[in-house]
Image (spheres, rainbow, N blue to C red):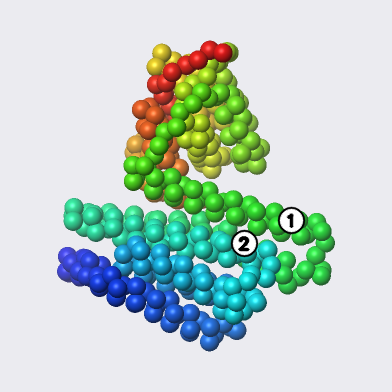
Amino acid sequence: MTLKKNQFIHFVLNRKPAKKMQFLLSGLAIGGVSLVAFLFSAYIGQEGVAFILLVTLSVIGMFFDIVPVLVAAVLSALIWDYFFLLPRFNFRVGNTEDKIMLSMYFIIALVSGVLTFKIRQHEMIARTQQEQEKTLVLYDAVLNSLSHEFRTPIAAIIGASDNLIADQPLLSPSDRKDLLSEISKAAIRLNQQVENLLDMSRLESGIIAVKKDWCDISELIYTVTLRLENELKHFELKVDTANNLPLFMLDYGLIEQVLFNLLQNATRYTPEGSSIRISANVTDPGLQLIVTDDGHGFPQGSMQKVFEKFYRLESSGTGGIGLGLSIVKGFVESHRGTVILENQSPRGAKFIIEIPTDKYYA
């Protein structure tokens, strides 16, 4: 019975109409759903319409090619702007909050369409390789993670924007500042997830261009800790760099993202008040970076899996979609380096990065 069900799903997902028909059907789907939503817009509101259009876009992504999905994403954003955002029936957005909401919707619509299409591709490959059940579990995990990671900041943006719009005469300057701060934090969180997805897309496509130059590792560490200042203030941060570190020939941006992801991972999975340590040393091949914490460490069975795409610990209740460490591995390997994860004794985790590179003593 299960085999027949899988064969039926495989048949439906692979039986695609011609490209012109895909454009027509996706346009009709977005248009039809928008028409129904417009008739009931007084009851569901513009935020509800946005979520309905995103769900419709995800369904389209399950069956059609990537180009019709992207066209449908752009069309849905234009329709939402023209028919549902105030002032209606033009493409002019009335205030800053609505501009932020429209920008976030456009980004999420594109990412949702692309990700749904990518997941469908992975499902078809996995079925060919007789890995149907594993792929379905991955699919559910990714969608659940994305649902949480996108819905939470979107809800914060919508809630803060609604308060700014509806209660503007009653808000003090301090209240307005707090609400704008919430919008900014939520937008940054969304941006981080989008950047992770784009980085993973670059890794998968093989278009990572390593642009090396002389880098000051102490400056790089300072830059990353400054970016994570709000998260790191709840921990005891220790930075240990060797005296007279040379300059290293590296891609500053890629290594900065490596260290950022490792530190962010530590702040998410380590109890507040714990110690997080960063050390940088010179080795014969080049550079050694070590990030350690005194948290709970990792289960033995997950030591290698943590570097896989979309993998998250089963016991984890924190945010994230499971891309941070896989990006770390990809960016380090693009430098011909290695990253190793170890559990410390008596507790904690230790990430060791070694990159062969030229050195310059100023």
Describe residue 165's horizontal placement relative to residue 240 as left or right: right
- Which-is-in-front pick, marks 2 and 1? 2
Give the CA distance from mark 2 to mark 1: 16 Å
- Please name the residue that numbered disc 1 is placed on: 178
Name the residue located 46 percent from the left edge and 71 percent from the top edge: 75
Answer whether labels 2 and 1 touch (C-beta < 8 Å).
no
- Please name the residue that numbered disc 2 is placed on: 100
Image quarter (top left, top right, bottom left or bottom right) of the N terminus = bottom left
Describe residue 66's horizontal placement relative to residue 156 as left or right: left
- The relative height of residue 17 versus residue 214 in the rendered view (above or below) is below
Circle 1 packing at 10 Å, graded few (<14), some (14-19), many (20+), is few
Foreground of the two, 13 or 82: 82
- For marks 2 and 1 on the same chain, the one whose residue lies earlier in the sequence: 2
Mark 1: secondary structure: helix
Residue 267 at x, y percent in the picture = 56, 39
Foreground of the two, 168 or 362: 362
Name the residue located 46 percent from the left edge and 67 percent from the top edge: 74
- The relative height of residue 47 versus residue 208 in the rendered view (above or below) is below
Mark 2: secondary structure: helix
Foreground of the two, 2 or 29: 29
Residue 59 falls in which quadrant of the image? bottom left
Asked if one can make out residue 5 in the rendered structure from this viewpoint, the answer is: no
Residue 111 at x, y percent in the picture = 44, 58
Asked if one can make out residue 193 in the rendered structure from this viewpoint, the answer is: yes
Residue 342 at x, y percent in the picture = 41, 29
Name the residue located 45 percent from the left edge and 42 percent from the top edge: 324
Q: Amino acid at mark 1?
A: Asp
Image quarter (top left, top right, bottom left or bottom right) of the C terminus = top right
Name the residue located 49 percent from the left edge and 21 percent from the top edge: 248
Describe residue 139's horizontal placement relative to residue 12 as left or right: right
Q: Amino acid at mark 2?
A: Ile
